[in-house]
Amino acid sequence: MIEAELEDWHDYEVGSRREIVALLRQIGEKNQLIRMLIKGEADVCVTSILAVDEDSGTVVLDRSVDRAQNERIVATGRVKCETTLDKIRILFGADGLAATTWRGEPALRADIPPTLIRLQRREYYRMPTPVSNPVRALIPVPIDAGGGMGVFPLHDISVGGIALLDNKLQLGAGIGRVIEGCRIELPEIGPIATSLEIRNSLDLTLLNHKTSRRLGCQFVDISRGGLAAVQRYITKLERERNAKLAGLA
């Protein structure tokens, strides 16, 4: 699973040595547990980062309590690692594994990875979209609701999908229905094309007593370039929000 994801999500790859070292140190400082896959899901070790030595290019990891498993880790020489940091999923490979000691105790060392994946997945991170200048989703409306392309404002966005507001109740609330031929216009990024699968529906009563509906939708058959565009837009929103919080905007 992680092996495939390291390739599939290379659009979210971090290649800056300084940033990689900083992320690994934060993972260690926050005592985040790491799933180390030795030979896939059948052989997993739970470990943590004890130290990161940028000068020697190594990261020190806690050993498994299973001696035989430690031997397998060193013998294989390369493992896949998965953890989270501030609800963001981190994936990386660890090469050059060898036995070492840390503060007098047995440990494992590995090379600092040249890249890692910093993945804000849907289940971890959803970014509210601006209310004053809503992001528009252009979605085909069913024939019985008037047909044509309807324009729907987004409520939030993630790399997994969107939540949109169906103020005129045009799209229905059929969970699992896939709507093809949709387009989302991301300000300053550009439009992306995707199909949308309705995953949840919530009817809302507004302050003016009118009814609206919020539909949670998952991207279906979105291109790698489209996902990268969504990630760029989320990053843009995050920077704007942080600037406002800092009183710079």
Image: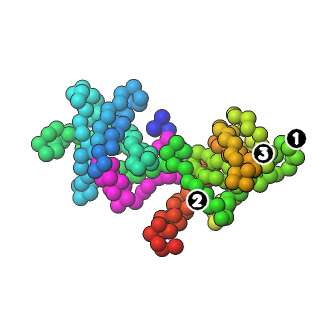
Given residues 104 and 72, the one toward you in this image is: 104
Does the segment drawn in magenta span residue 138?
no
Q: Which residue is mark 2?
A: 233
> In terms of sequence position, does the residue under pointer 1 or pointer 2 come before the other?
1
- Local secondary structure at mark 2: helix
| Position in image of residue 161 (x %, y %) | 62, 46
Circles 1, 2 touching at the beta carbon (< 8 Å): no
Give the magenta range.
5-28
Q: Which residue is mark 3?
A: 169
- Local secondary structure at mark 1: helix
- Residue 119 located left or right of residue 181: left
Q: Which residue is mark 1?
A: 144
Amino acid at pointer 3: Leu
Which residue lies at the image location 75% right of the left edge and 50% below the top edge? 210
* Residue 56 lies in quadrant: bottom left
Q: Is residue 181 above or below residue 185?
A: above
Which secondary structure dominates the residues rendered in magenta?
Answer: helix
